[in-house]
Amino acid sequence: MKRTGVIFLFVLFFAGAFSLSADPAPVTGVWRTFNDAGTKEESTVEIYEKDGKIFGKILSLIDPNDKDGKPARCTECDGPEKDKPILGMVIIKGLGADGDKWTGGRILDPNDGTWYKCSLKATEGGKKLEVRGYIGFSLIGRSQFWQKK
């Protein structure tokens, strides 16, 4: 009886240690994005892995055209994204595994051209994705929840 208890504790210890060092849940795939209120779908984003890092590209837009009927462009962006079409733009760059989430990269808000630090975490068994953009510390930012397509 005593030996069974010791074996059980041994197995429990290593199972706990494994779960603490396990990779974060996969975030790759196609996700439906929503406005900050979570009430209106805005786009679909493909999140993919390249060279051990996570990236995300806009696959489709609910409103793909600007007010003049032309394809929407990132007019507020700086650098290489300036005036480029939003459709097909890589808006998530360079996240790496960090515990149970992906961090260390950045995300672009093509509406205002601002890059934010970013973290991603799969929730609800991979059905939802918590996307957090922030400046400086993660406490100063906002989260959206995307749904797996």
Image (spheres, rainbow, N blue to C red):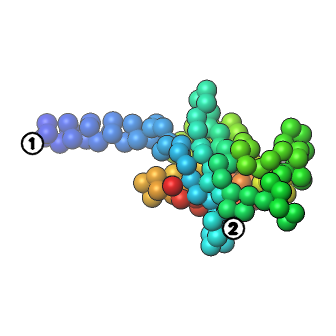
Task: Give the labeled residue for mark 2.
Answer: 36
Category of crowding for the residue at label 1, using alpha-carbon neighbours closer than 10 angstroms: few (below 14), some (14–19), many (at least 20): few
Q: In the image, what residue occupies the spot 83% across and 57% down?
A: 70
The reply, left or right, for residue 144 in relation to residue 74 is left
Decide which of 98, 82 is in the foreground and name it. Answer: 82
Quadrant of res 65: bottom right
Q: Position of residue 102 (x, y in %)?
A: 59, 43
Q: Position of residue 106 (x, y in %)?
A: 73, 44
Q: In the image, what residue occupies the spot 9% across and 42% down?
A: 1
Most distant residue in the left direction:
1
The reply, left or right, for residue 69 in relation to residue 146 is right
Residue type at mark 1 is Met
The reply, left or right, for residue 66 in relation to residue 11 is right
Task: Give the labeled residue for mark 1.
Answer: 1
Question: Comparing marks 1 and 2, which lies closer to the viewer?
Answer: 2
- Check disc 2 and report its element: helix, strand or loop: loop
Residue type at mark 2 is Asp
Category of crowding for the residue at label 2, using alpha-carbon neighbours closer than 10 angstroms: few (below 14), some (14–19), many (at least 20): few
Q: Position of residue 143 (x, y in %)?
A: 66, 61
Q: In the image, what residue occupies the spot 62% across and 54% down?
A: 44
